[in-house]
Image (cartoon, helix red, strand yellow):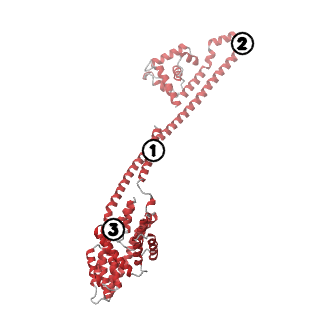
Amino acid sequence: MPRTIIHIFILAVCLAAAGCSAHDKGFPDRDDIAPENALRSLNATIEKAPRYQRLKAERFDSLRNLLRDAQSPADKLRITIEIADSYCQFNADSAIHYGARAVALIPEDTSPQTDTRARLSLINALGTAGLFIPAVKGLDSIGEAVKDPSSRIEYWKSSRKLYFYMLTYVQDHGRYADIYRRRYIECDDSLLRYLPKEEPLYRFIKCERLVTEGRLNEAQKDLQQLMTAQGDSDNIYGMAAYQLAEVYKRKGDFRGYATYLATAAESDIKCCVREGLALPDLANWLYEHGDLNNAFNYINYALEEANQGNIRMRTVAISALMPVIDQAYRKEINDSRNNMVGFAMISSTLLLIAAVLLIIIMRSMAKMRGNERKLAASSRKLEAYVGNFIGLCSNYASRLQQLAALVTRKISSGQSDDLLRIVSSGKFNETGSDEFYKLIDKALLDIFPDFVDSINSLLQPDRQIELRKDDPLTPELRIYAFVRLGVDQSVQIAQILGYSTNTVYAYRNRMRNRAINRDTFDKDVADLGNSQFSSVII
């Protein structure tokens, strides 16, 4: 039984190990996903996002205070445009509100540059909110009326941003994607012609064009230099990191791809840019590579940010990914829950087996302690038996010495007839009999302390033997004590006790007459002896 339980225990441990092994299967090698350091840094930045947003809100408060204190219409318009532009990537509704205020504040005698700048602030806000039709109409209304170079640059920047939003919204599908892409490239061409070459946006567009042309090493070098020059608190830094991720993707370095997506997402969070693509793209990539926990957290955070900023075109794009990632994440949770249930069942089985083994061990120990006690009692009985045996031997030796001295003395004095008379009369034997029987009784009761009670259990209730504490055994009890010891022959008992064989027969017959079961009495007494010896041996 213990060996079987041990086998079951080993089998359960093997099943638990197999379950853990099976649970680990199906997940990608950690080398195939973004480095842990990049994800840890991104997670830490997400936790600090409220602080960055609080600083952004403080900036808005400062601008609103400046607007309230502004005296001239020109200052009011300039500050309103700045507020609208600041809100553009953070909260589309607020950007539209201040963009519309800027247009309303345009004085009749303002310069064309100021008029264009105010109208573009509203167009940028409309594009961010996904209100593409009014935004395109606004651009068309400006059109070729913009003549001065600085206004044209701002016009192309707004056009480029708007067509990028529209291209992202249609997700590169259908004939409209080609139209939006062509106009986006036309804006890039115009900006590359008129922007100063040291301008960060010029350098970024140039790198983007290098990526499109497949000049990846050159683009990688220039993008890294641009990121170093800007720092992660500038939106150009996040744009460059996102483009650098594309470079690594085209090179087949997906670890670098995921790393720079995480870097771009961090920059977006620090700059409070809620329209960024990096975090949703990273979530989608992690989903495809089995990191469902981070994928679920990132896509949820991106959707929450887009909703708070009312960035509609980002909300639509993220919502397309959300159900897939959410379903996979919930499936993983259910699988994990099932695994937990399985492991709990295995653990419970192991605990049950351990409890059974513990009970078996405790019982075995208790049995061992009981055996030790029995062995100790048996040892004491054996010691008493040996002591009594030595006492009997000593008694016999003493009687033999006395007999030898008597024989020597009688023969030496010529009293042979007197010696023969003493021996024939049996007086010499009677002299030591009482002492001998006391030794016999003590030895028997030391070995079988419950001897009298055991015999009485076999006798009829009204014919049981009663002995006081210091009374010697009766001849009948003495004879059956030897039967209990296994000495069954009456002749042998007579020789040991010094009785005649007929006397032993008579005593045994008298006891049988008092027994509950006369025919099996001798066997019952002998069985009492076997049971006693068995318990001693155990």
Element class at badge 3: helix
Amino acid type at mark 3: Glu
Spatial separation of the CA atoms under disc 3 and disc 1: 50 Å
Which residue is at the front of the view, 149 or 522?
Answer: 149
Residue that label 1 marks: 354
Q: Relative to 224, does residue 481 appear above or below in the rendering?
A: above
Q: Which residue occupies the extreme bottom position in the image?
A: 109
- On screen, residue 201 versus residue 487, left or right, reads left
Residue 103 at what x, y percent from top left?
A: 28, 83
Three-letter amino acid code at disc 2?
A: Ile
The residue tagged 2 is 411
Q: How far apart are marks 3 and 2 (CA)?
A: 132 Å
Q: Return the residue found at the far top.
A: 417
* Image quarter of residue 166: bottom left
Q: Which amino acid does label 1 sit on?
A: Ala
- Earlier in the chain: of badge 1 and badge 2, it is 1
| Secondary structure type for disc 2 | helix
Look at mark 3 in the image and give the residue it sits on.
Answer: 304
- Res 39 quadrant in image: bottom left
CA separation in Å, label 1 and label 2: 83 Å
- Helix, strand, or loop for circle 1? helix
Q: Which residue is drawn at 41% across and 47% down?
A: 346
